[in-house]
Image: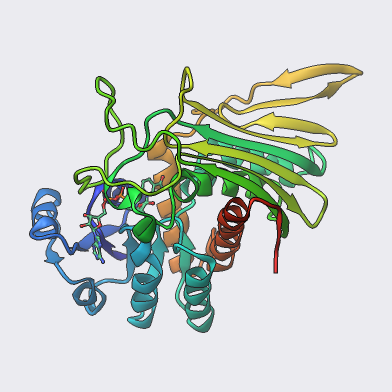
């Protein structure tokens, strides 16, 4: 399988390494920034580089593409790639809004090309193990979940900090991972209502020094109009509910990451993976023995690439189809809508 990567900033590095591990060759890269694609192609030993993604899509030697660009370009680039006959692995979120996601979903539905959304955390070993326990009914029906990623200093600047380019702050960046993980583990139930709050009290905290943070390829001078913090209570049609909170900027004593699901026969924490259940009328915790019980980035991206390539070869279905990426954007839209209106909103 011959791969093209569109957008050669931070996350493209993970995609390239994952394809290499999965035995596929990256043959072309494209990036609109002056000279960046050519530089990366030289670094990586990739044969062709383009400044215009359209030229990469017209490259007959490319079978499949990863879209690793800012959020505002995801849907339109993916639609163009599909029209050019390429299979598409599109980074999350698949658009800035539900409307953009539906546009891409419709293009995917009309074509025979694979479209997979980059929900990389689903492919990590800890998540796969927990999903297998859930699919086997070991924890019973899940009726409540909590997902939290509270970071103190995580606004990456550049396009991430522009609502127009990103669609929003931590909700769009890692909130989509948190909501997806819980929603996926709960069995992708249909959203009914969302009650959410967003806050922008601290800004990007560009005054803070002495601490590293993830930065966009072009972090710029520091403009910012996205939320610092969001929380939401999401209710599903099966009666289950999910409580989420995520932040870019927060006066917390530490960064915190947690995803937990609670079922009728057992519950589990995902990060790290630990199961709670009962044995002979006693409460027990079970520690699965895995190479990694927390999210391992290299492992997650390699597994994601393997699953995408298997789908491209027709061996499996897309692990994260456009329909699921769109459903996630519906939930994210509802989070912002509820927060803007100060009340619970219902799905249309
Ligand atoms: N799955 C994950 O865990 C994860 C982690 C980080 C980022 N991401 C996602 O990956 C995407 C890229 O994030 P990043 O951190 O690499 O950003 P980045 O700013 O580091 O890189 C983006 C690159 O895209 C290029 N670009 C912009 N518009 C383009 C266009 N129209 N055509 C081609 N190239 C274009 C930029 O010049 C830049 O080199 C985002 O959607 C982000 O949400 C996912």
- Left or right side of 297 for 192: right
> At 43% from the left edge and 58% from the top edge, which residue is drawn?
167
> At 25% from the left edge and 42% from the top edge, which residue is drawn?
222
- Left or right side of 4 for 132: right
Q: Quadrant of ligand 1?
A: bottom left
Q: As displayed, is residue 24 above or below residue 302?
A: below
| Along the line of sight, the residue nearer the viewer: 139 or 69 | 69
The part of the image, by quadrant, that contains residue 270 is top right
Is residue 56 at all visible to an observer of this figure?
Answer: yes
Is residue 86 at all visible to an observer of this figure?
Answer: no
- Left or right side of 132 for 278: right
Picture quarter with the C terminus = bottom right
Q: As displayed, is residue 348 above or below residue 128?
A: below
Q: As displayed, is residue 266 above or below residue 20?
A: above
| Along the line of sight, the residue nearer the viewer: 104 or 315 | 104
Percent x, y of residue 209 = 25, 23
Percent x, y of residue 192 = 74, 59
> At 40% from the left edge and 53% from the top edge, which residue is drawn?
305
């Amino acid at each position: 399988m011959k791969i093209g990567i569109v957008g050669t900033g931070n996350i493209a590095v993970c995609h390239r390494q994952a394809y290499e591990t999965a035995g596929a060759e990256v043959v072309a890269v494209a990036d609109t920034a002056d000279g960046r694609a050519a530089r990366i192609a030289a670094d990586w030993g990739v044969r062709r580089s383009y400044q215009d993604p359209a030229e990469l899509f017209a490259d007959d030697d490319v079978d499949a593409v990863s879209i690793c660009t800012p959020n505002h370009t995801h849907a339109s680039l993916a639609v163009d790639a599909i029209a050019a006959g390429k299979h598409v692995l599109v980074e999350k979120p698949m658009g800035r809004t539900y409307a953009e996601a539906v546009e891409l979903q419709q293009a995917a539905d009309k074509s025979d090309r694979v479209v997979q959304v980059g929900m990389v955390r689903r492919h990590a070993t800890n998540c796969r193990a927990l999903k297998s326990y859930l699919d086997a009914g070991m924890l019973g029906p899940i009726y409540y979940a909590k997902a939290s990623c509270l970071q103190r200093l995580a606004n990456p600047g550049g396009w991430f900090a522009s609502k127009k380019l990103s669609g929003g702050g931590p909700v769009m960046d890692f909130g989509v991972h948190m909501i997806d993980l819980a929603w996926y583990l709960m069995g992708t139930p249909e959203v009914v209502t969302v009650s959410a709050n967003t806050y922008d009290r601290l800004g990007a905290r560009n005054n803070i020094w002495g601490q590293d943070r993830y930065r966009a390829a072009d972090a710029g001078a520091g403009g910012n109009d996205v939320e610092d913090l969001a929380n939401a209570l999401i209710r599903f049609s099966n009666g289950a509910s999910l409580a989420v909170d995520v932040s870019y900027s927060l006066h917390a004593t530490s960064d915190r990451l947690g995803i937990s699901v609670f079922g009728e026969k057992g519950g589990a924490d995902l990060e790290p993976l630990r199961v709670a259940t009962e044995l002979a009328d006693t409460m027990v915790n079970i520690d699965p023995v895995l190479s990694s019980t927390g999210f391992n980035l290299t492992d997650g991206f390699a597994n994601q690439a393997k699953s995408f390539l298997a789908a491209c070869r027709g061996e499996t279905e897309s692990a994260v189809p456009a329909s699921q990426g769109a459903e996630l954007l519906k939930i994210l839209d509802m989070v912002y809508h509820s927060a803007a209106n100060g009340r619970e909103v219902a799905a249309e």
